[in-house]
Amino acid sequence: MNSQEPLLDLDTFEERFIDANRGKPLFLIRYQNIQGMEMEQFLTYLRNEVHSILNLTDVEFCFHMLDADTLLMGISPYSSWRGRDFPNIDSAVGRFHDECANNRVCLFDFGVARTQCNYISDSEEILQELLQASEKNLKDNLTRWSWTYFNRANTYIAGAANEAMIQPTISYDPHRRTFTVKGGEVFVGGGVYQNYRDLIQDIPSDQDLNRIELLILEKLIVACENAPGLLKFNISPQSLIDTFSQPEKVQRLQKLWDTMGLHSKNIRFELVEKPYEEHRFSLKDVCEEFWKCGVSFAADDFGVKSQSHQVVLELGIMIKEFKLDPISFRFKANEDQIKFLDNLAFIDYCKRLADNREAMITAEAVEDFDTLQFLMEHQIYQYQSNIFCGKMPIDQYKAEFSSMSELPESVVKEIVDERGSEMWNDHSSNIFELARNRGQMPRN
């Protein structure tokens, strides 16, 4: 923005600051109770000093007068801010505040808000989030200097790095008697945060977790750019209902994964076991909008809680995968006869449900070859377990996908029998790499 450009009206400010910066981090600085300068003087001072204040040149900025006592300043990067280059806007404005007071230039109160300008939310929603957060931060700053509000989590969400982990899904071909990676489940990790739990612990309690979940989903989709195979993303039913009840938001998300070189048929949402409420919109209605795009759904930890049964019956043919917790198949006949028979009955029930809708069954956390063989004997041919592959960085998955294929069953048995317990406890194991290193499968 030119230093002499006039104040923007709200619609133009929203368009210039938000709509033009999709996919970038945004900062909104709220200035109030300005003393020692007229508002026009203060605005001119900011325009002339902004690059010095922020110690940045890769920055765009614009202004809007919210009311007679409140000036809004929107800040975004021209391109992107990465890693250590990510600016500490909160601290920079705090120093500016102190310098103005110490040098008797002027006095003012300020609040800094920050969010990712995500692809799905309306510009009005994003602006409202920024207005509320900047007002809260201003009130906090009147009693304590909390310039790093929501800082670490926002840095992860807004960072340009492809930070995501994936645990491959392995499929068994009973005719060729080989194992091949077909896709995987995508997780938070591999950078600022090691897992979803650590990230959520950094989110202030007053934040909307549905919005945070949406930002994480977008972050993971962007990290998966051009990734092969069927990619599975966890999402709660409530987040789906609350976020995607408007069909245009489904279309925006589809546009995002199209831009990232991903195909709808290779996107699957795992509906996690969480209670949800349907008021104006139903889960089925929202899922049908995704289904029309080609997206399918998985029932996570099917059978562990009654919620998953409700979801399966509600969504019908849209459920294309049942993910089984080990409690559904781990009991041996010589350990607990009743639980073993219950496992057999439950597996038979799952197979019937899967056959009804041509869905897959995936056994999670298989611990040993005996259990694997039991599952194969009962025609459960898909697995997600450390004895095959632990979580790996998404970029490693992209690079190695084509080589993680056609692993003979005999090799799997030999390696798992020999090193199964070690691999089970190693969350970064890779049986395909082990087999190659031992010369037990062709190098690609």
Image: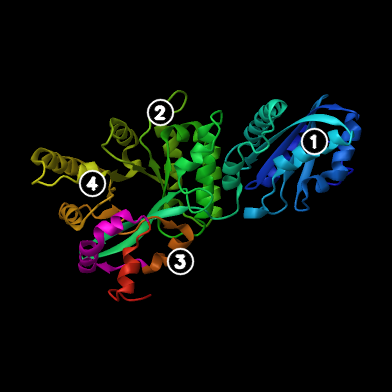
Which of disc 3 and disc 1 is earlier in sequence? 1
What residue do we see at 84% from left, 30% from top?
Answer: 107
What residue do we see at 41% from left, 32% from top?
Answer: 283
Q: Secondary structure at mark 1?
A: helix
Which of disc 3 and disc 2 is earlier in sequence? 2
Amino acid type, label 2: Tyr
Which of disc 1 and disc 4 is earlier in sequence? 1
Depth check, mark 4 against mark 3: the one in front is 3
The residue tagged 4 is 355
Q: Is residue 285 visible?
A: yes
Between 291 and 310, which is closer to the camera in this rendering? 310
Quadrant of the rendered image containing residue 297:
top left
Depth check, mark 4 against mark 2: the one in front is 2
Q: Are marks 4 and 2 in contact (CB under 8 Å)?
A: no
Amino acid type, label 4: Asp
Depth check, mark 4 against mark 1: the one in front is 1
Q: Position of residue 366 (x, y in %)?
A: 25, 52
Residues under labels 4 and 2: Cα distance? 27 Å
Q: Is residue 174 visible?
A: no
The residue tagged 1 is 97
The residue tagged 2 is 276
Amino acid type, label 3: Ala
Residue lying at the far front in this picture: please name it.
102
